[in-house]
């Protein structure tokens, strides 16, 4: 049974402290299919139908995960103000994905 988790309301994103990612490896990682395959192999025994990916960046691994696994719902969490718009746009038409601009905290 899949439990639907509602999308985070926009005020949550507004209250999230501003953070901008300054790395430059996203373009290189977008082409790293062997790395993604290896990474997914490490986690496959532990994946269910719903996955939360924390630190989704621009969504390249999330896109790969959805294309090769049986994941039916993905919650993609990304705190960076400069990468979140690309993540949200990438999955705007994918009902399986909920994007959240936020941090995880205790």
Image (cartoon, grey):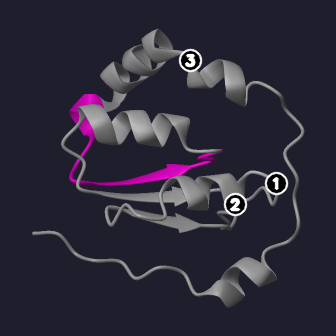
Residue bearing the label numbered 3: 31
Q: Which mark is residue 12?
A: none
Whether residue 55 is in magenta: the answer is yes
Residue bearing the label numbered 2: 85
Residue bearing the label numbered 1: 82
Please name whichever residue, 59 or 1, is drawn nearer the observer in this view of the structure.
Answer: 59
Whether residue 81 is in magenta: the answer is no
Q: Are marks 2 and 1 in contact (CB under 8 Å)?
A: yes
Q: Residue at x 59, y 47 (%)?
A: 56
Picture layout, residue 83 above or below residue 39: below
Q: Secondary structure at mark 2?
A: helix
Please state the horizontal and vertical placement of residue 94, each as a whole percent of the image.
37, 61
Q: Residues within 10 Å of mark 2 (few under 14, many from 20)?
A: some
Closer to the chain start, of discs 3 and 1, is 3
Please state the horizontal and vertical placement of residue 104, each as a whole percent of the image.
65, 63
Please name whichever residue, 101 or 44, is drawn nearer the observer in this view of the structure.
Answer: 101
Q: Which residues are magenta?
A: 44-57
**CA distance for labels 3 and 1:** 20 Å
Please name whichever residue, 99 or 103, is drawn nearer the observer in this view of the structure.
Answer: 99
């Amino acid at each position: 049974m899949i439990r639907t988790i509602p999308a985070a309301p926009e005020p949550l994103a507004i209250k999230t402290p501003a953070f901008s990612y300054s790395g430059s490896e996203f373009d290189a990682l977008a082409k790293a299919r062997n790395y993604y395959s290896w990474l997914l192999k490490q986690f496959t025994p532990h994946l269910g139908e719903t996955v939360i990916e924390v630190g989704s960046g621009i969504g390249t691994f999330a896109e790969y995960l959805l294309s090769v696994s049986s994941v039916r719902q993905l919650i993609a969490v990304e705190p960076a103000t400069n990468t979140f718009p690309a993540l949200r746009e990438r999955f705007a038409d994918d009902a399986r994905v909920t994007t959240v601009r936020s941090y995880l905290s205790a």
